[in-house]
Amino acid sequence: MTVSQIVPLLVILPLGAAFLIAVLANLPTGKPQQRNGRYLTSPLACAVVLANLVIAVSLLRVDVQQPIYVGGWGPDRTLGIQLLCDGLTKLMAVTINLVALVSIVFARPYMRRFTRVWLFEALFLLMTGAMNGVVLAGDLFNLFVFLEIAAIASYALVGFGCESEELEAAFKYLVLGTIGSAFILLGVTILYSLTGQLNMAKVAVVLQKIPANGPAVLLAAAALVAGLALKAAMVPFHAWLPDAHPSAPAPISAMLSGVLIKAAGIYALARIVFNVLGVNPYYANVLIALGVLSMVAGMFLALGQWDLKRLLAYSSISQAGYIVLALGVAAEVMSRATPDKAVAGLCLFGGLFHLFNHAAFKSLLFLSSGAIEQQVGTRRLRQMGGLARRMPVTSFCCRVGALSIAGVPPFNGFFSKLIIILALALAGHPALCAIAAGVAVGTLLMYIKVQRYALDGQPSGPAAQAKEAPALMGLAMLVLAIICIVAGLAFVPLRQYLFDPAGEILMRGREALLMGAAQ
Amino acid sequence: MNQSGMTLIVKNTARLVSGFITVFGIYIALTGHLTPGGGFAGGVILAAAAALVVLSFGRESSSKLITGPACHVADAAGALGFLVVALLGYLAGDFFINFVPLGQRHHLASGGAIPLSNLAILIKVGAGLAGAFLALSAFRLAPRPDLTGGEEL
Amino acid sequence: MGIAIYILTFALLLVGIYAVVAKKNVIKIILGVLLIDYAVNLLLVLVGYRSPTGTGQLGKAPILAEGESAAELARTAVDPLPQAMVLTSIVIGLGLTALMVAMAVRLYEKYGTFDMDRIRRLRG
């Protein structure tokens, strides 16, 4: 089995399993109106995501030298679909499949109160397969199509419970997401009309010959950045997130906040700005502005929230702002007359490490908030209290997540925030460094609030009768908590295997995708 | 006489015409590599035939022929068929490679694996759109007292 | 064909954006989203237009007729790749339309109105 035969499996397995689940759950077996296939759907989904994670982790050790073309349409024919499998793709694939595995294991006991659980699992696998497709896609239109599949699956999943609030949130998310996708397609259209190619490597080559300040290139870049910033929930494009993430069922909130805004939004933004359009002071300043706005606005809006999941959603916006700020400063350092590779590399490492960490601890926080909501029955912080005594496993995991995101050593959030702040200072932006440090303090405040109202104190009200969450949910949360602790303590070997190859791809800019293929 | 559905003329016309529409849809899908159309267009026409049957005969009578779970199964089976066609490429070496020998130009058997993919897409789109039509027509809305719609359309 | 048709396509995009932003009825918002989608599809098809250089002929559809050679087709036909992209985009738009309409019907069941000003239980 060569690498080019294994890599498409990351997309095929979830997609095939999604439709197999739809068949199994609807085939009439035995007596009429009885469909026994429903009992098989959940183990099948868990097994498929586990297989995906195993493939993604084993791909980490493989160094892909040749570009992977689907269907044998090799490099000499310009219309083939190319799949990427470089360092950045491998990092994102590991992150996506890890969070997906934990979420689907958590979903097994959590979704018992909904009907049509097979539909949930089929849509979930569609979303996972499509997100894997986004990070594997090597040409612009393939990226767009997989982005759309993941987005449509997530619109349906956000409104899964069909209560009035969930439908309203899903409708708003749908309208805004569709407008964002239309802008992405507009950008791809303009790039196609300029260059005549869709393959990312070839577009990068042709764009190098066109002056970067031409109005068409700027319009394409503006449309792409606007659409992708909407998918990544940057301020001022964030309006859908505070409604969509709290209303979704907890495993979907974890997937949306943990990986969808990163795989669909920030990954695509980084790939297109660094590897296709090329770094440029304009794009760098735009990324820095988006990052700072998101960080500050997200933090202020989160501090005043009394709904647990809404607070977590706003804090997602804030932390995503950290990542985009780090990427923007790296782009700005790389586009100077004498680029400082060490500082740019440090910025990229900080940003990518925070991406991985945020996927881990934000999913953990959303999963534990889902467990709390299921057992206590409410999301309002003032009505909880003293859960540390009633639900020990859940509150331990929630505490680990809260301390990680607040940046307390020795958890992983501390290291990634420290690296970002140091890199900002070394890059010569003291103001940004101060803003980042201030937002870190604000994050600490909001999570002290969460811990004080939800976990500590005396049990009161509905929290007094809360019981511990079911075993599978506790297991899923513990896995993420262990990853938070391990990623913090062992980030030096993680840097060597996961983050340095990814950062190097972004540093190499427009030549990174060529890999020795023909022009 | 069956009270559900439309009048006798409509029902007889639907009986005559729906077969032709189905065959036309399948024709458009199978010759997708020679003439414009292909799987998606054929599937839409097939779903139109299903919608014609459901509309003329009423939901109660046509629910013996076209049911919700059957649409789900056919939908997913079409997608799995497409995936099987793509996976059969592994027989010829790589994912999604064409494994059917190419014939002469302008003949029906000249498209390689494309007519097979078109057939799978036909089933999927037809069943999917018919299922969507059934789901949307299942809503029975009770009239609300405060019937407002914002401004006038 | 000149520049007028591209300006009209962008005007269609702006009409769609106006409908989403300024209208309050849920159905009108859905129509606005569809207009935005179709405007971008139209732009994509227009981008692919090619007329053969030299002669004043219009570009033909990219279908290979009996007796024609591939080189001749490549010279006279329009670009088929944007047409394939538009087909995919139309299918995506169809799926989104079905989802939006289903959600609008369910919203009417729950809230009793199509007015976006009243469908505002989530705030803050």
Image (cartoon, rainbow, N blue to C red):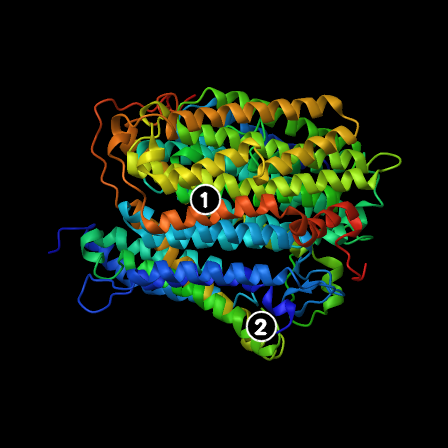
Residue A264 left/right relative to A332: left
Spatial CA distance of label 2 from label 1 is 36 Å
Which label lies toward us, 2 or 1? 1
Residue A289 left/right relative to A258: right
Chain at numbered mark 2:
B
- Quadrant containing the C terminus of chain A is bottom right
Looking at the rendered structure, the kind of residue marked 1 is: Ser
Looking at the rendered structure, the kind of residue marked 2 is: Gly
- Quick one: A246 or A67, which is closer to the camera? A246
Residue placed under numbered mark 1 in the picture:
A154
**Would you identify the image quadrant in which residue A44 lies?**
bottom left
Q: How many marks?
A: 2
- Quick one: C124 or B137, which is closer to the camera? C124
Question: Percent from the top left, x then y, of residue A481?
Answer: 48, 44
Residue at 29% of width from left, 46% of height from top? A114
Residue A116 left/right relative to A189: left
Residue at the farthest left position: B1
Question: Percent from the top left, x then y, of residue C77?
Answer: 70, 57
- Position of residue A68 relative to residue C27, above or below, is below
Helix, strand or loop under label 1: helix
Helix, strand or loop under label 2: loop
Residue B25 visible to an observer of this rendering: no
Residue at 62% of width from left, 22% of height from top? A438
Label number found at residue B111: 2
Q: Are marks 2 and 1 in contact (CB under 8 Å)?
A: no
Residue B64 visible to an observer of this rendering: yes
Neighbor class of circle 1 (other Cα within 10 Å; few <14, some 14-19, many 20+) is: many
Neighbor class of circle 2 (other Cα within 10 Å; few <14, some 14-19, many 20+) is: many
Question: Percent from the top left, x then y, of residue A268?
Answer: 63, 44
- Position of residue A144 relative to residue B64, above or below, is above
